[in-house]
Amino acid sequence: MAMLELENVHSYYGNIHALKGISLTVEQGEIVTLIGANGAGKSSTLRTISGILRHRAGSVTFEGQDLSQYPAHKIVNLGISQVPEGRGVFAQLTVMENLEMGAFVRTDKKEINDDIDHVFSLFPRLKERQNQVSGTLSGGEQQMLATGRALMARPKLLLMDEPSMGLAPILVDSIFETIVNINKEGTTILLVEQNALMALQIAHRGYVIQTGEIVLTDNAESLKSNKMVREAYLGH
Amino acid sequence: MKQQADTNFNLKEMIQLGATGGVILILLSLFGMVESFVERDIIYKSLSLGIALVFGVIFIFGYLSAKRNGNAKSSVGIAAGLITGLVASAMLAILVYAIEPLTLRAVFVNASPALIEALTFGQEMIPGLMTLVGLSAVASLLGAIIFTLPPVPRSAILVGIIMVITVGTLEELISDVIVNIFKLFDAKKAGKSFAGIFFAKEGLSLQGSVITFVSAAVISTLWKLRSQKMKTSFNKLPPATQKSAKISTLVILSLITIFMPQIIGSYLSEILVIVAIYTLMGFGLNIVVGFAGLLDLGYVAFFAIGAYTMGLLTSIQLPQTTGLTGVQMTFWTALPFAVGASVLWGILLGVPVLRMRGDYLAIVTLGFGEIIRVLALSNFLQPLIGGAQGILGIPKPIVFGFELKTSQELYYLVIIAAALAAFISWRLRDSRTGRSWMAMREDEDVAEAMGINLIKTKLLAFATGAALSGLAGAIFAAKLGSIYPHSFNLLISINVLSLIIVGGIGSLPGVVVGAFVLVGLPELLREFSEYRMLIFGALLVTMMLVKPEGIWPAAVQKRELHGHEEDESGIEPAPA
Amino acid sequence: MRSGRFKNLSIVDSLLWLFRVGIIVLVIWGSYKGLTSGKYTAEVWRDFFIFGLAQGGIYALIALGYTLVYGILFMINFAHGEVFMSGAFTAYFVADAFDKSGFLNSNPIAALSIVMLVSMAMSITIAALLERIAYRPLRGAPRLVPLITAIGASYFLQYAFRGLYGSGKKVYPEPAILSGKWIILGAPVLKTQVVVFVTAVAMMFILYYFVQKTKTGKAMRAVAENKDVARLMGIDVDQVIVTTFVVGAAMAGVAGVLYGLLFKQVDFIMGFIPGIKAFTAAVLGGIGNIPGAMVGGLVLGVIESVGPSLVLEGLGIPAAYQLKDVIAFTMLVLILIFRPQGILGQTLSEKKM
Amino acid sequence: MGILTAKNVSKRFGGLVAVNNVSVDIDEKTIFAVIGPNGAGKTTFFNCLTGFYTPEEGEIIFQGEDIKGIPTDQITRQGISRTYQNIRLFSNMTAIENILVGQEPQLKSSWIGAIFASPGTRREEEEAHQEARRLLRFVGMRGFGDYLAKNLPYGAQRRLEIARALASKPTMLLLDEPTAGMNPNETAEMTDFIQHIRDDLGITVLLIEHDMRVVMGISDWITVLDYGAKIAEGTPEDIRNNPKVIEAYLGTGAAGQVDSAEQIAE
């Protein structure tokens, strides 16, 4: 059984039909990427999984549990956490407070502190700035914070929404390296990216989404050489 | 979930619903509504308004309980209604029983012997309360049974009951109107005896209530069964006939408008004039808030300026303190000055708030409104505008040598003014100006980038709104003959804002409907003056929860507020 | 953000500058005249000032409720004045009973604490009901809609309490221990005013600590910034919003009893003016900003207490005390025109309706 | 000198220099592209040109007149018109109404005329409606006139925004990411359409765009911004091979292994 399974999911914003029957699976230990243009439904898929957007039809199951029975704030408890699009750090809270918010559902104080140390070892820059208000961080640092904050919930599945967006390519490389590292430590990752090439280089498998529908899926290597993908997303 | 409710007997939910009803009944009793409404008979000597209120609530909860629990089997629904009604009435009975031993009156002023007497029907405590619970059981059963009926008789009965209560409550006004109609045909006596069939000394007579109930039920049933057919058969008529039918409807409507004051008598005319003045202001504020999106909470300021200008320019007995003999203009000479002064202030107050948006604007305008009121009231400006004593001796308008003294005569003036305001609003809405306002409402920055001069456009909205409000103020001053600062409080701004929102923001018919509901109804129910504001508040909240787009929404707004419903347009909408 | 806008509107700008200069000149001239007229002694000015602080403390406590809710929902909770009234009005009956039984004087601290708890409990109940019934179903509606609901709820509550408790003014009992004056720093000060001020300040610090340091407080700040992301952290946003209303109401409940002690009377309409004043205070300090509400409240209280005698009488206006509300509202208007972010700088939402 | 010349334009927000000493010279009837990563100051630069911001330094000359510091609505009246990165239509107005608002600089009737429905006003309204319908057809949206803007499909909203911008009869059109969020087919259509605007209507087009196939395909001249400053300019060919452009964006890791065009597209 797959860790995460979406079957024929339909979601709406008001009367706007954003997802039109999305089906996808993520297996334990994988990096799976979802690529597509702006507005194709990538973020909506992630928002549906984490319960911010409620699907009206189809099913979302995580480790055998139907997620539609949980409100958004309970889904974190199951082991799904998300790095939202545009990073979404709480700009007026300090770096430390942001990380504490990441561990909001946990009560094990000591282990939370260990995890904070772990995040700081992943991102030493954050440690230097732990008492700084996070709105003053640079874009790259905010991306680190958002990632670290998501890890604070000790997720089994990490959803990442456009981590490279708006970052200089040099930073992009290091962010992608971190994603690989996090995955190696045992966290499964579902990665949404516009930078299709980069995403396909680190992912095991990928899905291509267009106007709310999955149009193609394969392993990353095959996708990279797929003619349609190359034309539409890789610019060849 | 729904499946379960059908098969299981959901006792908990019935009791919960009953408890809600009980809390409402207890509150109504403690607010003093039951007690004071008992004085008022709906059906002479048989049913008082207070008792109707209590059993009405029980009836409604019985109906609701049946609706929630009786989807599958009517017997379940009826039992549910009964249980809910019993719980609610038991709570009320406990309250009544506890009043004296717990000396509740020390805290709750309305927990009085009169309340006990009303709810025990003048009997001893225990038998009285048993009667109360017993009658409640009947009322809730009735509610539940009516729910289980097929739709046509159900709605007929409900309409009948509502009409009996309405007619009974408004007995005095309605019998007046009947007599007045007969008077038009010089048959006052016949009118009186005709009204006598329906009405007793107070409230409906017994036969009157039966007739009202039956005729309301029959008419509503016929309407329901026939209206669709009539519409289609009307559409089948040749266009010329349709047109003449429409024209004759229009003629009849305008005839009614012209003879309205004679038909409805002086008291209702008075109310109508007040409604029309609010409508006039409503059209003005609708331009500012509804069209241009500038949330103005101090709108009363321009009303006050119009009124005071009119007062100062026309009064024949200005306060001595002013040291002025007054210019003593006529209404018509002063009117342009009154409107002009409002416009001027509209622009002056508009300039500092040009850059403000949303909440800022609301608060600043609220502040302006309060400042003007407090200043008008103060000793500081007393020498000029009379302070708390106000301005007296404002003459009535004279038209062709005829003085418009009573409301029945002033009616024509305000109706024409309101019609003018509606016409201006309508023409402006569909013009370049109206589009600029709406564009500004949607997105100020983009509107500016389209070449719209925000300053001119905003000030024009403020000025038009102020002009209509000033006009209303001027007429108001002339109508009363005297003005006091107390007439210009925040409540007026809030009333006007509420009426355009309840009517449907941006909608022109909505303004009229809103004014009738929020201004007319409370005036009609003046005898309940103690509870006017209570009902007003509850109505506003309920209205916003149930129908946020208003009673008669502008076409566009309706779609916005109910955007989550499927769009009928049928084209593929955009992803977010 | 928008510094470049309206740069060239010389007419508008110069009008505003004229307005600004005019006000400043009037205030300075009036103060000078007021101070040099010698009508009031230094002691009187000091008493005005201290009374202003006590009154300002009450404004500040109420203002916190506006600011907390605004910070999290970007909505003006117009009915907050009634939340304040409901607590004070209800607690009156407890205070009165304690007074009659002698408990208030035999055990003033315990008695006043109970009175405050009752007041807080009532305010909290009303605020929670208000949120549940009148506001929660409207989340996401256009901004005008909850504003109208709030206005409706405000009138409903006023007249509901009038129905329940009657329309007369009730005289708040004063424990004997609070009558008279203390000598503080060599100056005699009314004990009530000291107690009111100190309690208000203490409550503000408790609240500040709560919001800054506790987990719930941090969650409140997180929700205020971004509700969706807060949900992703596992925060129950609805719960946090209710908590916000409750915390604001608790402050209003305390403020209600303090109001009773300071002004010695309560009635069903008492929430309206202090409500608007407190809102002014919140805007003055920078709405959504907690220290701002505290500072704004105190500043407004003092200005309102000192201002009429100082500036307006100085300008030769008769019966200047009648215009103290004008001072409050003029402050509000001036702040919004010239420094909309308030003293401590946070802006109202520019979103419309 | 071209139709629009910006000289040493700088715009600051607090300590941040969003646009740093940027100069451009745009020739008439060309398609001129501004590219660079998010946050490079492209949109801020647009906002300086349209008067939404007033730059602290530099000058902006449009058709021989200094337009720096002039209010937005007057700049529009002088012939600069724009679209927005995230579509900003008047969403509760119909498509036709949106275009009618766009015609604002062309209209003369006053509110008094509207109240009395004077013949002049009525004629102008009639003509404006006809023109609006013509523009709607021009952008390929015949029959969509009475839909509320917010209910239109995404691609149609983009096109409606352009129609609204064209309604003011501009001499220069600023397009902020016109193909954002479009699929490859829609992007190709939009590219054609932009060329059409220049070729058939003779309008100078200034373009912010991320999709390098669009930029390289239709631009006559490209300016590259990074951290608010201009780091390169030239023809598409120049830019493609400019070592500075490649260096500033590529990095050395995996990202570097794609061709430059892909990189600039983020």
Image (cartoon, helix red, strand yellow):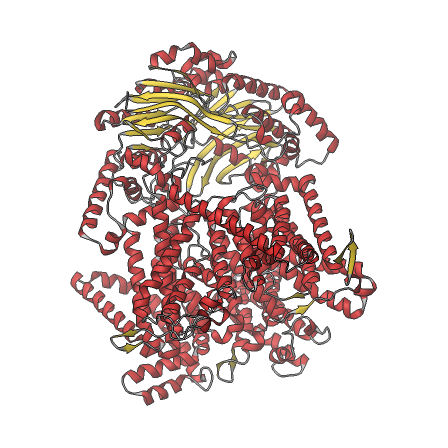
Q: Note whether residue B536 is visible.
A: yes
Residue at screen point 46% across, 54% down: B365
Indicate the position of residue A8 as horizontal and vertical percent values.
47, 35
Between B7 and A138, which is closer to the camera in this rendering? A138
| Residue B430 drawn above or below residue B167 | above
Whether residue D92 can be seen here: no
Image quarter where the C terminus of chain B lies is: top left
Q: Residue furthest right?
A: C106
Towards the viewer: B130 or D55 = D55
Residue C292's place in the image compared with B521, above or below, is above
Figure quadrant of residue B574: top left
The picture places residue B186, in percent across and down from the top left corner, at 28, 87
Front-lying residue, C336 or C305: C305
- State the image quarter where residue D266 is shown: top left
| Front residue of A150 and B540 | B540
Q: Quadrant of residue B88?
A: bottom right
Q: How many marks?
A: 0
Residue D254 is situated, as x and y percent measured from the top left of the image, at: 51, 13
> Could you tell me which residue is drawn at 52 percent across and 16 percent down?
A170
Measured as percent of width and height from the top left, residue B542 is found at 50, 60
